[in-house]
Amino acid sequence: MLYAAVAARSFRRYATYRIATASGVFTNTVFGFIIAYTYIALWTERPHLGGYDLPQALTYAWTGQALLAATGLLMGGGMDDLQERIRSGDIAVDLHRPADLQLWWLAADLGRAAFQLIGRGLLPMAVGTLVFPSALPASAATWLLFLLSVALGVVVGFALRYLVALTSFWLLDGAGVSMVAGLLCMFCSGMVLPLNVFPGAFGEVVRLLPWSSMLQVPADVLLGVHDGAGVAGALAFQAGWAAVLLAAGRLLQSVATRKVVVQGG
């Protein structure tokens, strides 16, 4: 109940920033148009690039805009608050709460992601699919599997950002690490280009990295690239990375909190 309440309060917190949400919807829509026209030019020259036809490629582009804030494809999100609390020393208050630190921030991030998906994700994708050809599925089961895949992608995104935030225990100012992590996430998640377009060993490796769980895998589930056992394998891939990264976060948290020093305490 405690963590459900944290998630609900996080959802309401982000819902209060209405002007910021409207600005985000506008920005996502504009960038969606830019990326969509770029994809049209690219797929006109190279039809079926990466195994996608043009409507699938455009649907991929708008799916990226819909998940941009929800899965934290630019990093940041609520983890900026955690980094600031570590830098200022307020993290000592969090550690004295009768709650698990990692689960607390995971619950808060799930609430944030739920609002960002509804508040900033649905409208840009609706606009994109109305203006451009799309390959959205008609099956309700596919949509449910897509939402499950998005939820797993959100957890993977949180786990990665939590690891980055914990580096502030040693660096104090984690802005540099966050910037590098954001650039890495944009490329390796498939935000710049679908990972399927990269050939050879490089393409194979980048598709096995955890960042692909945040956009490439959910988009492929939505587009019906996987079927039957393939969908189960894709979801298991995401769940596996989520478990590994959450365990790594818990281990790093245990190491980090041993060195917390509070002035006057």
Image: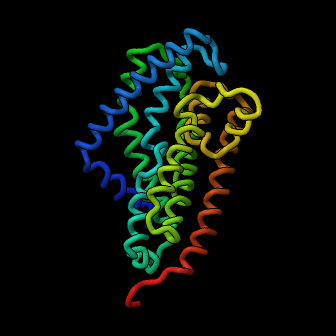
The N terminus - image quarter:
bottom left
User: 164 or 146: which is nearer to us?
Assistant: 164
The C terminus - image quarter:
bottom left
Q: How is the image coloured?
A: rainbow
In this view, 25 is above or below 158: above
User: In the rendering, at what x and y percent does residue 67 appear?
Assistant: 47, 37
Specify whether residue 155 is in view.
Answer: yes
* In this picture, residue 30 sits left or right of residue 141: left
Q: Residue at x 65, y 25 (%)?
A: 197
| Quarter residue 153 falls in | top right
User: In the rendering, at what x and y percent does residue 103 appear?
Assistant: 51, 64
Q: Residue at x 39, y 28 (%)?
A: 31
User: In the rendering, at what x and y percent does residue 6 appear?
Assistant: 40, 62
Specify whether residue 1 is in view.
Answer: no
In this view, 134 is above or below 143: above
Q: Residue at x 65, y 49 (%)?
A: 239
Residue extending furthest toward the bottom: 264
User: 141 or 21: which is nearer to us?
Assistant: 21
| Quarter residue 218 falls in | top right
Q: Residue at x 53, y 65 (%)?
A: 167
What is the count of numbered marks? 0
User: In the rendering, at what x and y percent does residue 132 appear?
Assistant: 43, 15
Residue extending furthest toward the left: 19
User: 161 or 137: which is nearer to us?
Assistant: 161
User: 233 or 228: which is nearer to us?
Assistant: 233
| Quarter residue 30 falls in | top left
In this view, 71 is above or below 36: below
